Amino acid sequence: MIENMFSGSDVSEFRIWMGWADRYVILTHMGPDGDAVGSSLAFCRYLQSKGKQAVVLVPDSAPDFLKWMPGADQMKVYADDPDSAEDMVYKADVLCCLDFNVVGRIGKVAASFLYSKAKKFLLDHHPYPGANFDITLSHPEASSTSELVFHFICALGDFRMIDREMAECIYTGLMTDTGALSYNSNNSNLFMMVSHLLDKGIDKDDIYRRVYHNYSESRLRLQGFVLNEKMQVYPECSTSLITLTDDELRRFDYKKGDTEGFVNMPLQINGVLMSAFFREDNELGLIKLSFRSVGTVPCNRFSSSFFNGGGHQNAAGGEFRGTLQEAVNRFRQGLEEWSESQEDCIKQLFRK
Ligand code: 5GP
Ligand code: MN
């Protein structure tokens, strides 16, 4: 049996809201990934099938490889029309916040979020949730927010209402946040859920192909360039760093989402326990940082200590305002500082 992960009072309170609330806006984080989009679209479709007015609002657009998802064509992008997006947020009865923990992660949507009188509902799996929510369902132990959406719909007593389209969205989020069930997924409950999703009619192999075998030729060549020329490996600290400048990205006709997964690749090297990827983003005027780690190495602590970022123990990120070279220097200083640490979870990086 699938266990109920939520407290009865939180579920009851949301059910009470559903008694009077008609207008729902589902918000998710900047640079929406498979889990952000998957969990949001699944929950939106669920609310719609309960007769509610529900819409997904993303701060910026999702990458093309997620555009096939059921309902993706109906998502509103804040950047496309900020006035009407803000209007929606103000007029909402309930704001459902999926796959982010703090308001800073929704970028320019944050101001209207903070001023809106709507009830605020958080359903998320990032540690350290902020304090801006009326109901906070924060489960860092969950593989993905999509998994939580499945459980939350079940807790509301509506397992039967999950249709194939919702199941596809949920599976996509689960798949992209676990590297197709290759990490963060040692949980029999999760496989029970996948079994239910298959019963709902998903074709998981086809979803895999739609997401991961959907590259342009230039994206694949960029990957070759990165591995051949841009990946630095530092065996003395079990770490790797990839950097890409705006010029390099242009050479390979960069499209949003093209660098997704690059940060994971160096972890395939025997002995590499932490990987970093820095991408120059001239449009945003910053360096976007991604970190990944293995086992007990806390890459979120590296990101928060040296870059004011955050995330999960094994998948974290952040932003750096400065040049790429300055970010690299900070990275090296961070490793230098960590090499003095007496904590086992950090010391393991520096063992020869
Ligand atoms: P990614 O490397 O896929 O962009 O992000 C991995 C994880 O790092 C995300 O799930 C999120 O938890 C966290 N993350 C990414 N970017 C940021 C950021 O700018 N600030 C913070 N605090 N966390 C981030
Ligand atoms: Mn997620």
Image: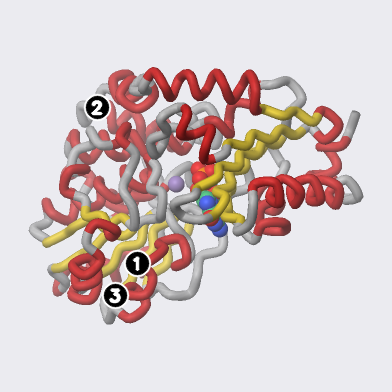
Per the image, the residue denoted by label 3 is: 119
**Image marks 3 and 2: residues in contact by CB distance under 8 Å:** no
Binning the other alpha carbons within 10 Å of mark 3 as few (below 14), some (14 to 19) or many (20 upward) gives some
* Residue beneath disc 1: 109
The answer to whether 34 appears left or right of 70 in the picture is: right
Does any portion of residue 177 appear in the rendered image?
yes
Asked if residue 15 is positioned above or below residue 182 in the image, the reply reads below
Mark 2 crowdedness (10 Å alpha carbons): few <14, some 14-19, many ≥20: many
Q: Residue furthest left?
A: 51
Question: Looking at the image, can residue 7 be seen?
Answer: no
Q: Secondary structure at mark 3?
A: strand
- Proximity of marks 1 and 2: CB atoms separated by less than 8 Å: no
Which of these two is toward me, 240 or 19? 240
In the rendered structure, the answer to whether residue 83 lies left or right of residue 346 reads left
Q: Is residue 29 above or below residue 150?
A: below
Q: Is residue 309 left or right of residue 5?
A: right
Question: What is the x, y in percent for residue 31?
Answer: 41, 49
First of labels 3, 2 by sequence position: 3
Q: Residue at x 86, y 31 (%)?
A: 236
